[in-house]
Image: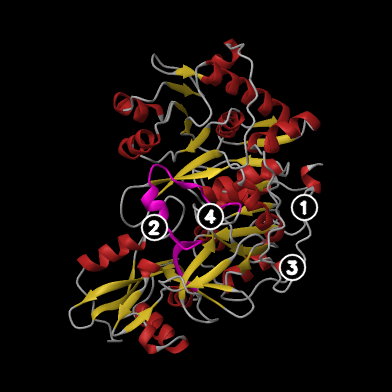
């Protein structure tokens, strides 16, 4: 059966998205076999990747499979065994996916690493994971060389664009190798990938996933992208493939569905460059973080840069941003919800009539989402509590690497505690309120920032808005807001925004001050770093605004 025939009928059953899973998990499953090798057997000349990371090159499934199988055989010959960790420190490029699939073919665990990590961040992740192999390039190699002596389990480094006295050339090694690939049969439950995630406290944790977790992503892809896949589709995301959003919301599913994937992540994202790429590569499907969409909205859109559909997640999307994308780009935007531990668990699907302004959407098939209190009791519709996901879902993580206690702490009974506060209506629509640690307690009120930020962002002069708790000697904390703007605002701009929130929401939700910043602190995955803003608010003297 071809990838284009794998779609299932997720028709209504009670709520539109039924909680019972239509995704059948086989006993044996291998991501590389499903995403690459099976296609190479039937369609060796089909386009797999359009690589714009350097000199533009088109890679077919046959070429990608040949390279992945040779690399897998070479690693086996060097002693890499099932369960060993293989780190990949590369930007978006064909070699990134070749390395992932080569690891998966022999039952090894691929470990994506972000190219902007410094030596300390890399040292921690490589040491903690016990990675045996690193695949990187000459740009990143100096960081690995600096820390290599502190990594006793690291046996070999491969460079995809050269070689060094202590690092092998990836491509020369493959040309010289005649080691045959010995097939490894993997259970769907066998480990396949580990992605490090950082919470608000403690060291980064390695989130270990099984081969089955790809199958858990499919309901979202098929429902949020209308008429997907089809022969005209081309996929792209500016999100780095080192993170679950870029890798599993776009890159790996494109291979599974045999949709050509564009490889290009800009060193510095600009709307103009994004629109040029969309036009030249004829991209139809895109995963665009809200930050990217907001920047693109500020730019002139070329007439020949159009998309069919967009998925987005990580920050709430405003109704006017969704409307702009539909009107100007011709694309439906569907919001996605998920975490590294359990991705793409809920969202909207406008083509199927599952969308409600101000709400994320519903749980996708196979995902049982509940709003629970601290004791694990389900709350009634409309009450705010912890967003939780039942552990019996295909994309649920296996564990935190070497952290049994931390893994157990993330569950209340059989439900994963996401750390997000939200509510659910009687129809099963999910609304995000705030991260648990982003909730503001001011003058006795517990206030989530999402609604306030959405109201501030309605102003055409505001590009991004972030609301935080700021220390106050009288009230304990007050609501403060940071915004980035499209042009220098006139005097009174901040007071106008405060008044807007007071009128449209409530006076008790209005920020006590608004500060314009040149640049919003962002995480590597495009989310606003509110912890950094809280630190800024704590260090700066409180501004006396007329609204006080």
Q: Which region is colored magenta? A: 394-422
Question: Going from the N terminus, do you reach mark 2 or mark 4 first?
Answer: 4
Residue plotted at (72% across, 71% down): 353
Report the residue marked by disc 1. Answer: 7
Nearer the viewer's eye, disc 3 or disc 4?
Answer: 4
Whole-number angstrom distance, CA of label 3 to CA of label 4: 23 Å
Question: Going from the N terminus, do you reach mark 3 or mark 2 first?
Answer: 3
| Callouts 1 and 4 close, C-beta under 8 Å | no
Residue plotted at (51% across, 35% down): 110
Residue plotted at (51% across, 49% down): 397
Residue plotted at (57% across, 55% down): 288
Report the residue marked by disc 4. Answer: 342
Report the residue marked by disc 3. Answer: 352
Instruction: Name the quadrant of the C terminus.
Output: bottom left
Residue 492 or residue 146, whichever sits in front: 146
Q: Does the stretch in magenta take in 405?
A: yes
Report the residue marked by disc 2. Answer: 409
| Callouts 3 and 4 close, C-beta under 8 Å | no
């Amino acid at each position: 059966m071809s990838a284009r025939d794998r779609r299932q009928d997720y028709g209504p059953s009670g709520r539109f998205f039924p909680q019972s899973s239509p995704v059948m998990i086989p006993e044996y499953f291998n991501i590389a076999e499903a995403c690459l090798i099976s296609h190479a057997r039937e369609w060796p000349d089909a386009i797999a990747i359009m690589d714009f990371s350097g000199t533009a090159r088109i890679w077919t499934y046959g070429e990608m499979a040949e390279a992945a199988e040779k690399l897998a055989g070479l690693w086996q010959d060097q002693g890499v065994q099932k369960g060993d960790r293989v780190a990949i420190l590369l930007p978006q490029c064909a070699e990134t996916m070749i390395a992932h699939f080569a690891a998966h073919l022999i039952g090894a665990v691929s470990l994506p690493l972000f190219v902007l990590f410094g030596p300390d961040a890399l040292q921690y992740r490589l040491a903690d994971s016990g990675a045996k192999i690193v695949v990187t390039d000459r740009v990143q190699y100096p960081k690995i060389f600096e820390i290599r002596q502190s990594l006793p389990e690291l046996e070999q480094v491969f460079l995809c664009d050269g070689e060094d006295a202590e690092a092998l050339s990836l491509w020369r090694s493959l040309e010289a190798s005649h080691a045959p690939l010995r097939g490894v049969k993997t259970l769907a439950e066998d480990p396949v990938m580990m992605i490090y995630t950082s919470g608000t406290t403690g060291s980064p944790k390695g989130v270990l996933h099984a081969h089955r977790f790809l199958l858990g992503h499919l309901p979202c892809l098929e429902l949020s992208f209308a008429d997907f896949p089809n022969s005209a589709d081309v996929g792209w995301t500016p999100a780095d493939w080192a993170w679950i959003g870029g890798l599993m919301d776009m890159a790996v599913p494109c291979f599974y569905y045999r949709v050509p994937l564009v490889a290009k992540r800009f060193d510095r994202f600009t709307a103009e460059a994004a629109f040029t790429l969309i036009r030249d590569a004829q991209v139809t499907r895109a995963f665009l973080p809200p930050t990217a969409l907001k920047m693109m909205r500020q730019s002139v859109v070329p007439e020949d840069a159009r998309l069919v559909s967009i998925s987005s997640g990580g920050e709430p999307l405003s109704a006017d941003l969704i409307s702009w994308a539909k009107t100007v780009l011709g694309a439906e935007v569907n919001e996605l919800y998920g975490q590294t531990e359990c991705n793409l668990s809920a969202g909207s699907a406008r083509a199927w009539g599952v969308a409600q302004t101000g709400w994320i959407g519903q749980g996708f098939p196979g995902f049982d989402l509940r709003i629970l209190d601290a004791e694990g009791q389900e709350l009634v519709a409309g009450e705010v509590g912890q967003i939780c996901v039942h552990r019996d879902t295909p994309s649920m993580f296996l564990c935190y690497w070497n952290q049994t206690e931390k893994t157990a702490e993330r569950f209340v009974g059989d439900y994963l505690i996401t750390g997000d506060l939200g509510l659910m209506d009687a129809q099963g629509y999910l609304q995000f309120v705030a991260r648990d640690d982003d909730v503001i307690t001011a003058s006795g009120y517990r206030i989530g920032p999402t609604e306030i930020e959405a109201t501030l962002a309605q102003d055409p002069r505001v590009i991004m808005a972030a609301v935080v708790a700021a220390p106050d000697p009288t009230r304990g904390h007050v609501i403060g807001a940071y915004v980035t703007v499209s042009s220098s605002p006139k005097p009174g701009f901040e007071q106008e925004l405060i008044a807007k929130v007071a009128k449209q929401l409530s006076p008790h939700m209005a920020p006590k001050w608004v500060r314009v910043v040149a640049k919003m602190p962002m995480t590597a995955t495009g989310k606003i770093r509110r912890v950094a803003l809280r630190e800024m608010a704590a260090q700066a003297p409180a501004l006396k605004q007329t609204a006080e």
